[in-house]
Image (cartoon, rainbow, N blue to C red):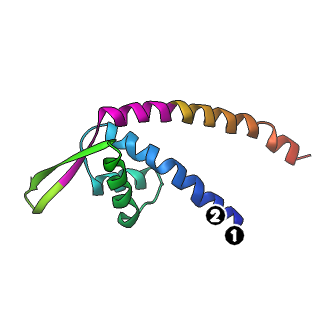
Amino acid sequence: MIAENTQTQMRKGILEYCILSIISKGEIYASDIISELKRAQLLVVEGTLYPLLTRLKNNGLLSYNWQESTSGPPRKYYQITAEGLEVLRRLDSTWKELHYAVETSLQGRNESNNN
């Protein structure tokens, strides 16, 4: 139970970062964001994604525009704002620091567990 809770919190903690990173590559439709996250093995459902996109938009990190679709109603396409790019840059730096800290903490663990 404790491991599952920690795993959930870890995934939640990096979800915004991954979403901003995906959107920074160019304008994208929400279902394509979900596909990118699934490809990265970070499974997210629409019920999780849409409130997060709305919060990021309300915080000025994303914007969107409507585009006509040949196969149904217009679609909302998201793009990152200048403020979103600045936040992403800061998250990149934080991720590098965290990655280093985790990797450094894990060094030697396997050797000491085998003794």
Write the residue at 64% across / 65% down: 4
Q: Amino acid at mark 1?
A: Met
Category of crowding for the residue at label 1, using alpha-carbon neighbours closer than 10 angstroms: few (below 14), some (14–19), many (at least 20): few
Task: Mark 2 and mark 1 in contact? Answer it, CB < 8 Å.
Answer: yes
On whether residue 100 falls in the magenta region, the answer is no
Picture coordinates of residue 69, whole percent (x, y): 10, 57
* Residue closer to the observer: 103 or 110: 103
For mark 1, what is the residue?
1
Picture coordinates of residue 88, whole percent (x, y): 42, 35
Q: Which residues are magenta?
A: 76-92
64 vs 52, left or right, is left
* Residue closer to the observer: 5 or 72: 5
Report the number of numbered marks: 2
In the image as oriented, which residue stretches furthest toward the bottom? 1
Q: Secondary structure at mark 1?
A: loop
Picture coordinates of residue 28, whole percent (x, y): 25, 47
For mark 2, what is the residue?
5
Q: Amino acid at mark 2?
A: Asn
Picture coordinates of residue 35, whole percent (x, y): 35, 55
